[in-house]
């Protein structure tokens, strides 16, 4: 079940509540369903109860409870929890979750680096006026590709009035090399001062760029090693033990939303930080992809390999939007 499909189920629950007289509101045209944020749970979450509370003249928690019972009875839904001021957190049943993961992997493998690209900004021209400063130039250059991934176009100019002015780099990042320099300038939020230090070059877990590039190269190594063992990715995921795949599926599911927000908000750092989250989920799954000792490759191994392969594709695509190389060997 995709977020779009689940959005339709949520809207159906709202319509039923209106028809049955428990809510007196105009049914919205659409609702946002996305991966739960901090404090949430389950597979997806929606803020529809908070959206409808004021026009319904009811507290958000009351609206959430009205919708919760209807959502819980929907096909494919195993559980619905209410968290915070009225967020509805939806857990899918095992079969539905497996089907959703299977569809996700198939979609990524079909779209390749274009996964997450959309026409959100189709026809829009984003005019950026930046100062003659290295960080501003690098951020603008990344936005050309990120906005382009959403169907928009960026035109870069210089001089006043400036509308893109991140905190300048304290020193020339060129000695770090092209990739580490770009990461050092793009990873911090615009209001944070970038660190131009050799920490961006060390190959250890404390270095976020290393984790992202290592996770990508690890997925390529898994494919090579699996081929030596005589098996290849399977586009289906197992319905039982996913070997820690839930976190990775959630990160991959969130990628289109993060990419769209990075373009709309002119925020390449959001994409960079999401790639770190995705990389950490890949590294958590990696030990379960290949068989141990005399263990024979199973359907579960092929399924996890397909998921790792898809994640590697998304990591490489995300790094390319930032202008950073994703080597197969590291």
Image: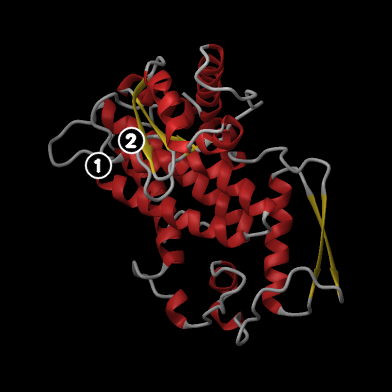
Q: Is residue 201 above or below residue 321?
A: below
> In whole angstroms, how far apart are the C-alphas of marks 2 and 1?
8 Å
* Residue at the image position 41 percent from the left and 47 percent from the top: 220
SS for callout 1: helix
SS for callout 2: helix
- Residue 223 visible somewhere in the drawing: yes
Q: Residue 125 placed where, x, y %?
A: 84, 51
* Residue at the image position 59 percent from the left and 72 percent from the top: 185
Mark 1, other Cα within 10 Å: few <14 / some 14–19 / many ≥20: some
Q: Which residue is mark 1?
A: 288
The colour mode here is secondary structure
Q: Quadrant of residue 300?
A: top left
Q: Which residue is mark 2?
A: 304
Residue reaching furthest to the left: 294
Which one is earlier in the sequence, the residue at label 2 or at label 1?
Answer: 1
Asked whether the residues under the numbered discs 2 and 1 touch, taking CB atoms below 8 Å apart as contact, a structural biologist would say: yes
Residue reaching furthest to the top: 20
* Residue at the image position 78 percent from the left and 79 percent from the top: 132
Q: Residue 131 placed where, x, y %?
A: 78, 77
Q: Which mark is residue 127?
A: none
| 2 or 58, nearer to the observer | 58
In this rendering, position of residue 314 left or right of residue 219: right
Q: How many marks?
A: 2
Q: Residue 22 placed where, x, y %?
A: 49, 19
| 39 or 34, nearer to the observer | 39
| 302 or 24, nearer to the observer | 24
* Residue at the image position 40 percent from the left and 75 percent from the top: 202
Mark 2, other Cα within 10 Å: few <14 / some 14–19 / many ≥20: many
| 280 or 305, nearer to the observer | 280
């Amino acid at each position: 079940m995709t977020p779009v499909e689940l959005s339709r189920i949520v809207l159906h629950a709202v319509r039923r509540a209106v028809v049955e007289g428990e809510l007196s509101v105009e049914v919205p045209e659409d609702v946002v369903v996305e991966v739960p944020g901090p404090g949430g749970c389950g597979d997806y979450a929606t803020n529809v109860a908070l959206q409808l509370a004021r026009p319904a003249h009811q507290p958000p928690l009351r609206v959430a409870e009205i919708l919760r019972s209807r959502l819980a009875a929907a096909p494919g839904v195993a559980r619905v929890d209410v968290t915070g001021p009225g967020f509805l957190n939806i857990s899918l049943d095992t079969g539905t979750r497996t089907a959703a993961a299977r569809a996700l992997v198939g979609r990524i493998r079909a779209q390749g680096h274009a996964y997450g690209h959309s026409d959100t900004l189709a026809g829009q021209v984003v005019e950026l006026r930046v100062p003659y400063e290295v960080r501003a130039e690098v951020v603008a250059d990344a936005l050309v590709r990120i906005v382009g991934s959403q169907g928009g176009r960026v035109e870069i100019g210089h001089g006043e009035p400036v509308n893109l002015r991140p905190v300048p780099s304290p020193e020339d990042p060129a000695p770090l090399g092209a990739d580490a320099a770009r990461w050092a300038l793009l990873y911090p939020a615009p209001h944070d001062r970038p660190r131009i230090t050799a920490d961006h070059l060390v190959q250890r877990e404390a270095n976020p760029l290393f984790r992202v590039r290592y996770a990508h190269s690890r997925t390529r190594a898994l494919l090579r090693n699996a081929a030596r063992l005589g098996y290849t990715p399977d586009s289906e995921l197992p319905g039982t033990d996913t070997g820690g795949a839930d976190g990775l599926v959630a990160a991959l599911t969130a990628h289109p939303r993060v990419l769209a927000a990075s373009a709309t908000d002119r925020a390449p750092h959001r994409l960079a930080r999401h790639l770190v989250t995705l990389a950490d989920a890949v590294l958590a799954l990696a030990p379960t992809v290949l068989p141990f000792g005399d263990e024979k490759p199973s359907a579960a191994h092929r399924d996890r390999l397909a998921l790792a392969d898809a994640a590697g594709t998304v990591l490489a695509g995300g790094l390319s939007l930032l202008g950073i190389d994703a080597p197969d060997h590291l």
